[in-house]
Image (tube, rainbow, N blue to C red):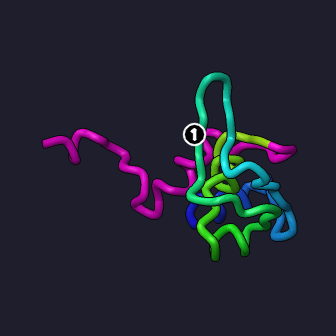
Amino acid sequence: MAVASAALSEGTITPETTVNDASGAINVGAYRFGDWKTHGLMNVRSAIAQSCDVFFYALGGGYGGVEGLGIDRIKKICRPLWLWPSDRRRFAR
């Protein structure tokens, strides 16, 4: 939900933006990023409700006409929510 919040607040998507998870995966070069099932056409509400990985992959990195947030904008939203540590060494043990 943090990535969805970031994409909405950054204006990269609207509540009506859709991503078509027609294959249940995103292929990037030789890498396949799979979903737990094929969902079909998803908007942000249905993607959250059905836990559609492909929708969130698209939000993070860009895919299917959706501009990806990229790591810097994801950090900007997640850091204040304590979802992105400002100093990773605190968590290393």
Amino acid type at circle 1 is: Ile
**Image quadrant where one finds the N terminus:** bottom right
Comparing 28 with 87, the one in front is 28
| Furthest residue in direction top, as rendered | 30
Magenta stretch: includes residue 79 = yes
Please determine whether, in this image, residue 44 is positioned above or below residue 85: below
Residue 9 in sight from this viewpoint: no
Q: Looking at the image, is 57 positioned above or below residue 46? A: above
The residue at 68%/41% (across/down) is 26
Percent of width and height locating residue 18:
84, 60
Residue 16: x and y, percent? Answer: 87, 68
Q: Which image quadrant is residue 8 in?
A: bottom right
**Taking 77 as reference, is 18 left or right?**
right
Q: Is residue 27 visible?
A: yes
> What segment carries the magenta color?
64-93
* Quadrant position of the C terminus in the picture: top left
Position of 56 with respect to 21 (left or right) is left
| Pointer 1 local density, CA inside 10 Å: few below 14, some 14–19, many at least 20 | few
User: What residue sits 60% from the left and 35% below the top?
Assistant: 32
- Residue 58 x, y percent position in the rendering: 71, 47
Where is mark 1, residue-wise?
71
Q: Secondary structure at mark 1?
A: helix
* Residue at 62 percent of width and 46 percent of height: 73
Q: Nearer the viewer, residue 39 or 12?
A: 39
89 in the magenta segment: yes
In-image side of 30 versus 80 (left or right): right
- Which residue reaches farthest left? 93
User: x%, y% of residue 69?
Assistant: 68, 45
Q: Name which residue lies at 64% across and 62% down.
A: 52
